[in-house]
Amino acid sequence: MSKTKLPLRSIAIAAIAVLALSVWYVTRDGGSPQQTTFDTTGTSDAVTAASDTEARPDLFIGHADAPIEVVEYASFTCPHCGNFHKSVYPQLKANFIDTGKVKFVFREVYFDKFGLWAGMLARCGGEDRYFGLVDQLLKKQDEWVRGSSDADVVSKMFRLGRQAGMTDDQMNTCVGDNDLAQALVADFQLKAGQDQVTATPTFFVNGEKMSNMSYEDFEIVLNERLD
């Protein structure tokens, strides 16, 4: 039986990228019942660098010319984001995304190294597999985010990657890519800063900022914009 080779040295470097570049910190106890808040106060060289960075193209699912654009800011380690993808997103996808009514954009927020590694892993399979992996990482959050060690967390994430058809070599390369780590953090800082996002999940419906909500409330909001 082959063993998963975990790139712990490279992973450590990628984690340093988050610690060095990010000025957003979790304040879970202060959040609302449906959101995890984080602090965007303070300044650093990283914020200045991010403002000079060209934004990476958004990844989206649905029709590019759909009448409604929904942008979700989410963290892979945010429990409220996990709950949204378990209870709300499946209905949203079936009734609005798959029917051509909504273009759904996903923007990653990084609270911690685990969330960053998950985002890096999601990109390993390319754009065709990205949303499937995002969905699985969020729905099965409890299965991997509470690992006993960094290596255990990565090993459990890799199980999901294998289910998506990726090899250990592919995943090791992606999760150990320090340039990718820095680019993702810079993109997160740029977009979240511009949109003044301070909690996850946060949504923008045709540019209007909204908090987390039930499917029933989301349905009302979307149908109002289709009338």
Image (tube, helix red, strand yellow):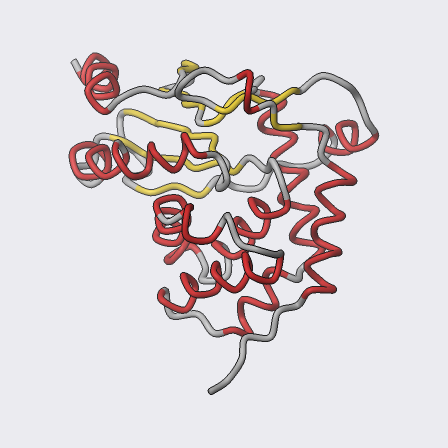
- Left or right: 125 as drawn, with respect to 56: left
Which of the pair 120/76 is nearer the observer?
76
Compared with residue 18, is residue 28 higher up or lower down, i.e. above or below? above
Task: Tell me where residue 218 appears, x and y as whole percent.
Answer: 25, 20
Q: Quadrant of residue 192?
A: top right
Q: Quadrant of residue 63?
A: top left
Which of the pair 61/168 is nearer the observer?
168
Quadrant placement of the C terminus: top left
Residue at the image position 42 percent from the left and 30 percent from the top: 72
Residue at the image position 37 percent from the left and 21 percent from the top: 212
Task: Tell me where residue 173 appears, x and y as whole percent.
Answer: 61, 67
What is the residue that sits farthest to the front in this orientation? 148
Compared with residue 152, is residue 99 higher up or lower down, i.e. above or below? above
Residue at the image position 38 percent from the left and 37 percent from the top: 82
Which of the pair 64/113 is nearer the observer?
113
Compared with residue 44, is residue 60 higher up or lower down, i.e. above or below? below
